Amino acid sequence: MRKRHTPKDRLITVALHVALAAGLFFAAFPIYWMLSSSFKSNTEIFALPPTVLPKAFTLEAYAAILGDPVKLRFFFNSYFVAGAVTVLTVLIALLAAYGFSRFNFRGKGSLNTLIISTQTIPPITLLIPFFGLVVSYGIFDTYVALILTYLVFTLPYAILLMTGYLNTLPRDLDEAVAVDGGTSWTALWRVIVPISLPGIVATSVYTFLLCWNEFLFALTLTKSTSMRTVPIGIQLLMGQHAFEWNQMMAMSVLGSLPLLIIYLVAQRFFLAGMTAGSVK
Amino acid sequence: MTRQKRSHHRLKRAVAPYLYLSPSLLIIGLLMLLPMVTVIGYSFQNSAVLRRDPSFAGLKHYQAIFADPVFWASLWHTLYFTCMSVVFHMTIGMVFALMLNSDRINPTLRNILRVLYILPWLFTAVIIAVIWRLLLEPNGVVNSVLMQMGIIGSKVEWFSSPATALHAVTFANIWAGYPLFMVSLLAGLQGIPRDFYEAADIDGAKAYQKLIFITIPQLMPIIISISLLDFIWTMQVFPLIWITTGGGPIYSTEVLSTYTYKLAFSSYNLSQASASAVVILLISLGLTLLYIRYQKAR
């Protein structure tokens, strides 16, 4: 056991706590500043000296965002696209993961490598051909264009995450179905899916996060204000009224809310997605 | 089972995995591999995308890019931005992970701090950009505090002066990206057997010796694979720079992704943009190959 109460030891403990506090300030102050600015009036934001707590607490920025149908539409678009992509991704990835996890077949290793390497394809490289394709198929500025493109980026992660999860489930479970004469398809839906809920939730959370954050394709493949998503909406707000900082912060808070809530409610699923593919 | 039935069953088992994989492979093939071939094709055409029957351009667009000083400046900025980000993500991630893993802090405090230290990772690049623009506004809180402390004499225009802009965006990206390292290293730290440290204690090892001879070597696989992934992803960063500086002022924060984007969608020179996109693709593929070889060797 470590000696606990020497003066030197106590000093180290105090120093560690000071360092932890400094770390907390570094990590959280920018976020705190966003939050507190969203409750200030626009003139108070640049008051000298800066006010740490809003002196005149106001919800005017939130009222301005939530009372504006154009901005509410950004939120609807983000939720709709992210939701649709999440459902599609999880379904398709579940099938692929089942194939990877429960079967041995020719080309398995190379297909797995292919999927790992698609994680690192630069979005900007795909943007130009996607733009060409989307325009030539007449789906520019539609949900379909966004959903299809997001699917390509979410699928590799989702497959790796789901395969990792299915590999942790004992094989006897679905082999029992095969012994009873059932097909692998029945085994998947009757046995695997019901016990895979944690894996499905983790995959959904991560997919939703990827879609919710996407910027480059939403910027390029949509044009009309009614098709824009939240990240683009924030950028537009920046261009239109360069000085409405409180509204920009309120919109940022509202735009971060879904991820914050999911994180606080389901931390462990969140972290599962975060480290997927990078740590075995 | 009869023999016929058994062979039928075996055939089904042989075909089944391909059927399960087919939707994914179809999407990846049509929407990822095919576009990659397409963009390579575009880079050898004149007026790609814009004209129905583009003529063959040979290596013209690649030559144009390599002759463009802005391209080389972007490459250099990308390298600086990426290397600094990865080094500091790793350092901060490591320090935070070690602090959180220490048995000198109480478990409740540890859990609370772990949740809070991850926070920057939860925010979208666009929101991170907006937050840092607010903090670093000439009239903003950072300048005001630094002036009060006497560190700077007058207001610094962090994002709009060529001397500071690249450092400012790099700093914002460092802030946003360290939690990936922290979480992975924390998981790695918990996986190191305690006996290693107990044995070292018996030998009278000092804390820093345990760090250098046990902790870091044990974490090396995680450090290497996360560094490679972080390098690849940071190299591709677009929204953070686009919203804070847009690549300016006077190209001082232009990186490969903003350079390519502007070629494509501001100048509508999609052929040259494709050539630049292919260069980025090649760099990424090279690093990905390293990553995969490393993962397989483990």
Image (tube, rainbow, N blue to C red):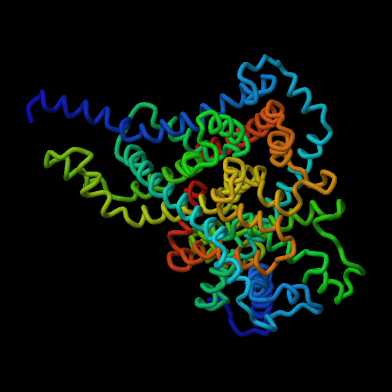
Q: In the picture shown, does residue A144 fall above or below A204?
A: above
Residue A142, image x and y in percent?
A: 50, 42
Q: Residue furthest right?
A: B153
The residue at the point 26 percent across, 54 percent down is: A194
Camera sees residue A250: yes
| Of B298 and A36, the residue lying toward us | A36
The residue at the point 32 percent across, 37 percent down is: A99
Residue A3, image x and y in percent?
A: 58, 80
Camera sees residue B214: no
The residue at the point 24 percent across, 46 percent down is: A189
Residue A108, image x and y in percent?
A: 39, 31
Q: In the picture shown, does residue B156 fall above or below A111?
A: below
Q: In the picture shown, does residue A178 fall above or below B196?
A: above
Horizontal arrangement in the rendering, residue B195 relative to residue B45 (left or right): left
Residue B70, image x and y in percent?
A: 81, 36
Horizontal arrangement in the rendering, residue B135 relative to residue B125 (left or right): right
Horizontal arrangement in the rendering, residue A84 relative to residue B180 (left or right): left
The residue at the point 60 percent across, 36 percent down is: A127
Using the rendered view, name the quadrant where residue A140 is placed. Answer: top right
Using the rendered view, name the quadrant where residue B46 is placed. Answer: top right
